[in-house]
């Protein structure tokens, strides 16, 4: 291991965090030269979030848009991540 060999990485990297306001965020980065779909399912209660109604929003450098609303403790999301770009998914508890 001289450090000069090729390195293979996955095209998509993602991380989940919890904001102090109760929102969840998933930051997804695409290092590839092609767009990729990213899909995940989160058990919100398992990650310490309370609530049973969620608003899903996609935020990119170009736009911010509501993806939809979901009920229950499990949230499923699929989003396209453009080539060499990133997407922030915001999951907010809602009343209703």
Image: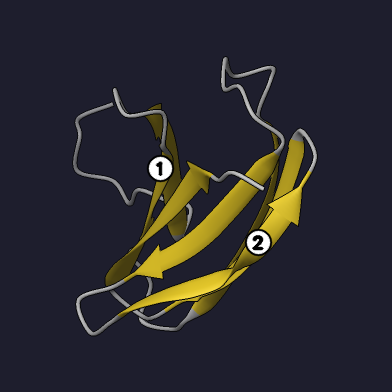
Q: Is residue 26 visible?
A: yes
> To which quarter of the image does residue 94 belong?
top right
Q: Position of residue 95 (x, y in %)?
A: 59, 44
Residue named by callout 1 = 25
Along the polypeptide, which appears first: circle 1 or circle 2?
1
Q: Nearer the viewer, residue 1 or 33?
A: 33
Q: In the rendered image, which residue does mark 2 sit on?
A: 69
The residue under the point 57% across, 14% down is: 48
Percent x, y of residue 9: 42, 50
Looking at the image, residue 62 lies above or below residue 68? below
Q: Which SS class for mark 1?
A: strand
In the image, 76 versus 1, the foreground residue is 76
Residue at the front extreme of this rendering: 96
Count of marks placed on residues: 2
Name which residue lies at 54% across and 75% down: 36
Q: Is residue 1 left or right of residue 72?
A: left
């Amino acid at each position: 291991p001289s450090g000069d060999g090729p390195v293979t990485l996955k095209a998509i990297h993602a991380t989940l965090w919890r904001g102090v306001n109760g929102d969840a965020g998933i930051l997804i980065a695409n290092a590839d030269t092609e767009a990729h779909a990213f899909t995940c399912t989160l058990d919100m209660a398992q990650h310490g979030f309370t609530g049973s109604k969620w608003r899903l929003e996609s935020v990119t450098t170009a736009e911010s848009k509501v993806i939809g609303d979901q009920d229950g403790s499990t949230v499923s999301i699929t989003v396209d991540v453009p080539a060499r770009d990133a997407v922030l998914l915001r999951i907010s508890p809602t009343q209703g």
